[in-house]
Amino acid sequence: MAAGGRQVKEQGKPDSAGMDYLQTLPRRWVTVYIPLGIFVFVLLFPFYWMVVTSFKPNEELLARTGNPFWIVRPTLAHFHKLLFETAYPEWLWNTVLVSVTSTILSLVASVLAAYAIERLRFQGAKPAGAAIFLAYLVPPSILFIPLAAIIFQLGLFDTRMALILSYPTFLIPFSTWLLMGYFRSIPYELEECALIDGASRWQILVKIVLPLAVPGLISAGIFAFTLSWNEFIYALTFISSSEMKTVPVGVITELVEGDVYHWGSLMAGALLGSLPVAFIYSFFVEHYVSGMTGSVKE
Amino acid sequence: MLEKLQNNRNALGLAFMLPAAVLLLLFLTYPLGLGTWLGFTDAKIGRGGSWIGIENFEFLVGDSVAQLALFNTLFYTVVASIAKFVLGLWLAVLLNKNLPFKSFFRAVVLLPWIVPTALSAIAFWWIYDAQFSVISWVLMKLGWIDRYVDFLGNPWNARFSTIVANVWRGVPFVAISLLAGLQTISPSYYEASAIDGATPWQQFRHVTLPLLSPIIAVVMTFSVLFTFTDFQLIYVLTRGGPLNATHLMATLAFQRAIPGGALGEGAALATLMVPFLLAAIMFSYFGLQRRAWQQGGDK
């Protein structure tokens, strides 16, 4: 029996394949491939539609005849309009600036907090960890009104600083929670050895813990960057002048003029605003997935 | 010596916690308290209000628009969450099969969740356009309808259209999180149950679901939380219209507080969302408890 089992494995059937090989091919098509194909089609169609619309000339966009799924004469006019006749480049710059700064700020604060909670074990570390988790559950939708009042009092209304300081409210809880999980996986022995060799806590953090937690740092970093890039409600509430807006808010509030919708440039704006995160995502898929599932599972 | 170390540890811990604590206390805890306080005042933008008791809440309870917003929020949350759960679980089970290009599919599926919601909502806006909707075009060609569907112009159409957009955005999160849970289930359970003669449905019902239930509880709590407090999709697609039919509590709070200037009333509306959020958090808490108990942990 044992030899038989080994033989099956040697034939190259990994354990994870489970019993799928028992299913016949037509059955697999009906139960797996076709539903999966429909899922992928529906999930990707809006992106295809974004691309098609942003390269379509206006005549084709508003034509009732012809096939809407294809472009007869592709044009760059919408992108030209977006980049040279609107404040879009400024919005892009604002978004980059705000996202990068608030990500770095949150990451530094989160690394220190996560290390303190997970490894320094100071008195009150456990309640602090629980408080971080609760903070993670507070949605921006119930915070933005009082935050607007505070931002106004601090004289930060309509500045990038308002966003840089308010984004950490959702970035820090998330990153700290994520990093706590990573720090937990680093063996105590390493730190103890370093302590015996006379390293200070700061040296241990910088030279031992952080290098070992690099995957966690990347996960937290790109996730924080994506969250701040995609943020909408704070940027909508705290910013009023066009040159301070971020891409999502700018596209929604400035490109729609009255009842005339410039669908081409709206889509071009949406496409250009989505590309940076999609691009980063394509390089760090595994980190995203581990970041997302890690934050849910822990 | 021990005491010195202990002191040292506490001082160091405090110093390390300081940056995060200052930012969170100032911009999260304080606004939470301030929000509740503002709900009891008649504050306007740029002007502190004075205490008016529960007047805001009394007004909102009698306000038909606020009542409609509460109904919409509950309807939106319940329908979208159930759809996200069913479709997300199905997608997770599909992705857990032994597929070619598995990692490619997983990467592609998560895309709707990664891109800015406000921007993908614009794509939906165009897809739902009353005159140029591509869905209407296809249905016309198939001969299923004889005039273009007014997706966002009619109350019930608008409700379901926004729910579809929300489900589109939320399914990847549910699916990928549940997939992570599915991958931890040992194949030997399925082999054992198959030997005992279990059908695929019985395996799913009596092996997959019970083992997955702790993760389902957590994922769905987050999903409900995100859906209940949703703002972007509605703001972009309908701004709460037509006739307030799609106003959620969050969008109504925004409309009353920021363009309308009535900070106090908006804050009261936002405060009214808290009991529901607490219910969701309790749910999550018990989900986590159950997970620790199942693992035999002492957490």
Image (cartoon, coloured by chain):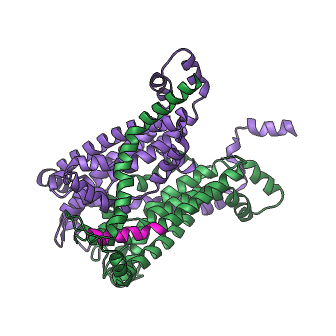
Chain colours: A purple, B green
Q: Residue at x 54, y 40 (%)?
A: A181
Viewport quadrant of the N terminus of chain B = top right
Q: Residue at x 45, y 40 (%)?
A: A219
Q: Residue B290: horizontal and vertical position, in percent?
A: 67, 56
- Residue farthest along the right direction in this orientation: A1
Tell me which corner region of the image, top left, top right, bottom left or bottom right, holds residue A280: top left
Q: Is residue B188 left or right of residue A83?
A: right
The reply to whether residue B62 is visible in this rendering is: yes
Is B274 one of the magenta-colored residues? Answer: yes
Q: Is residue A85 left or right of residue A222?
A: left
Q: Is residue B53 above or below residue A60?
A: below
The reply to whether residue A283 is visible in this rendering is: no
Front-most of residues A151 and B8: B8
Determine the main secondary structure of the stretch shown in magenta: helix
Magenta residues (range): B263-275
Front-most of residues B76 and B294: B294
Q: Residue A197: horizontal and vertical position, in percent?
A: 54, 14
Q: Is residue B110 above or below residue A287?
A: below
Q: Is residue B79 left or right of residue A279?
A: right
Is A143 one of the magenta-colored residues? Answer: no
Q: Residue at x 25, y 50 (%)?
A: A162
